[in-house]
Image (spheres, rainbow, N blue to C red):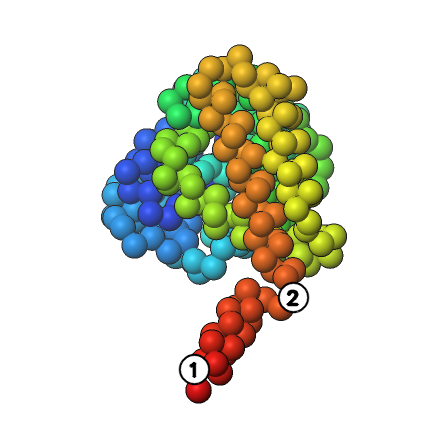
Amino acid sequence: MATLSVIVLSKDVEKEIVPTLKTAHFASEIILVDTGSTDKTIEVSRPFITKVIKTSPTQNFARWRNEGAKAASGDWLLYLDSDERISKKLAEEILATVNEPLHDAYTISRFEVFLGKHLDHWPDSRVLRLFKKDSLVRWKGKLHEQPQIKGTIGELRHQMVHLSHKNINEKGLNTLNWSRIEAELLLKANHPPIKGWRLFRIIFTEFFQRFFKQGLWKDGTEGAIESIYQSFSRFLTYVQLWQLQRKPSLKDAYNDIDKQILKEIK
């Protein structure tokens, strides 16, 4: 019988981690990869986990997931985030699959819940989260990380539940951090200089894509909020890229202003 290791990433999620761990009870082991919690995340998780890996809080999702794989002893690996839940039907399908696999890895569809409501017109976001340990080459990508897999990839039929955006304040802070990392990656990729007209195009293109073309207008207030939120997220990324590209830097510019003022005082 194949063994399964569930690997869960966490940071300051004491209020939501326990349901995630409970839905993973069918696994051979559960590994918590904690990325610098300062609350009681590790304490409340201990009754449900096999081991905890404390890792660097420096944001690098690929490294965190690779550390989880290194600590796992199972034949198969299943990755979960703290805002994801495994339904009973999905758990049964996973166990059946790992014991009689047709492929080396599997994608899982997510049932998206945004601000308490399922968005019918959010695109099916399949994630590659279940695979043989020996088939994983490595995770790659500081943000929006993806696993590199040896072998064939199949699809599971049942969905995992993704409880996204439980409140705007919490997600706003995450978006600010992620947008900074995205901006740094764009800078390294030599993205063209950001101009005012480009910012307008980015915002309106994203909103048009989400609200009209994708059809989120049919999902009521929550659909409108998500469309605006995604546009704002893109805006933050490119504003931070503009800030990184700016010559002189904002810090230098303000220092020069101070120098000029102090010079006039003398």
Answer above or below: position of 106 versus 139: above
Badge 2: residue crowd in 10 Å (few <14, some 14–19, many ≥20): few
Residue 140 screen position, x and y as percent = 63, 50
Image location of residue 143, percent across then percent down: 57, 48
Residue at the spot x=57%, y=53% of the render? 240
Compared across the picture, whether 55 is left or right of 203 comes to left
Is residue 193 rendered to the left or right of residue 85? right
Position in image of residue 119 (x %, y %): 49, 18
Of labels 2 and 1, earlier in sequence is 2
Mark 1 closeness class: few <14, some 14–19, many ≥20 residues within 10 Å: few
For the residues bearing labels 2 and 1, Cβ distance under 8 angstroms: no
**Residue at the (42%, 32%) spot, across then down:** 165
Label 1: state its secondary structure.
Answer: helix
Q: Which residue is mark 2?
A: 247
Numbered badge on residue 212 = none
Q: Quadrant of the C terminus?
A: bottom left
Image-quadrant location for residue 209: top right
Residue located at (43% from left, 31% from top): 164
Query: What's under tag 2, amino acid-wise?
Result: Lys
Specify the amino acid type for callout 1: Ile
Q: Nearer the viewer, residue 124 or 130?
A: 124
78 lies left or right of 241? left
Q: How many marks?
A: 2
Q: Residue furthest top?
A: 218
Horizontal side of residue 231 vs 192, given as left or right: left
The local secondary structure at tag 2 comes to loop
Would you name the residue on which mark 1 appears?
265
Does residue 112 show up? no
Q: Residue furthest bottom?
A: 266
- Mark 2–mark 1 distance (CA, rounded to whole Å): 27 Å
Nearer to us in this view, 61 or 232: 232
